[in-house]
Image (spheres, rainbow, N blue to C red):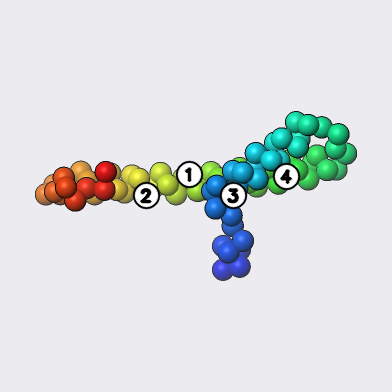
């Protein structure tokens, strides 16, 4: 499991690779097998991006909740 985590690209890396996959698919000239392989890779990359974005949403919600806690000082708020 630790190996799988180490292989997971950052959001930016996944997004960049996904952009390249889409470009290659739109360009055409690929065999059906190549297109299917690229599509599958694109689906995996989109899933990775969604996981990163979901994690960011959770962290943002937690930061906002801490900010709204009674007694929280505005100058110590994360935003």
Which one is earlier in the sequence, the residue at label 2 or at label 1?
A: 1
Q: Nearer the viewer, mark 3 or mark 4?
A: 3
Could you tell me residue 52's position as x and y percent? 50, 48
Labels 3 and 1: the sequence-earlier one: 3
Mark 2 / mark 4, whichever is N-terminal:
4
Graded by Cα atoms within 10 Å as few (under 14), some (14 to 19) or many (20 or more), the crowding at tag 4 reads: few
Residue identifier under label 1: 53
Residue contact between numbered discs 3 and 4, judged by CB atoms under 8 Å: no
Between 68 and 28, which is closer to the camera in this rendering? 28
In the displayed structure, does residue 32 sit left or right of residue 75? right
- Disc tally is 4
The residue wearing badge 4 is 40
Circle 2 is placed at which residue position? 59
- What is the distance, in whole Å, between disc 3 and disc 2 at their CAs? 20 Å
Q: Residue 13 — which label?
A: 3
Mark 3, Cα crowd under 10 Å, few <14 / some 14-19 / many 20+, is few
**Residue at the limit of the structure toward the left, as seen here:** 71
Q: Which residue is pictured at 61% across the width and 61% down the height? A: 7
Marks 2/4: CA–CA distance: 29 Å
Q: Is residue 57 left or right of residue 74?
A: right
The earlier-in-sequence mark between 3 and 4 is 3
Query: How far across and down, in percent of the image, does residue 11 sit?
Result: 54, 48
Number of residues whose C-alpha sits closer than 10 Å to that of mark 1, classed few (under 14), some (14–19) or many (20 or more): few
In this rendering, which labeled residue sits more in front, label 3 or label 1? 3
Q: Residue at x 48, y 44 (%)?
A: 53
Q: Residue at x 31, y 49 (%)?
A: 62
């Amino acid at each position: 499991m630790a190996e799988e985590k180490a292989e997971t690209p950052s959001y930016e890396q996944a997004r960049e690779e996904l952009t390249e996959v889409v470009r290659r698919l739109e360009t055409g000239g690929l065999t059906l097998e190549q297109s299917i392989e690229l599509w599958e890779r694109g689906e995996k990359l989109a899933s990775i991006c969604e996981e990163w974005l979901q994690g960011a949403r959770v962290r943002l919600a937690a930061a906002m909740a801490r900010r709204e806690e009674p007694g929280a000082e505005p100058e110590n708020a994360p935003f």
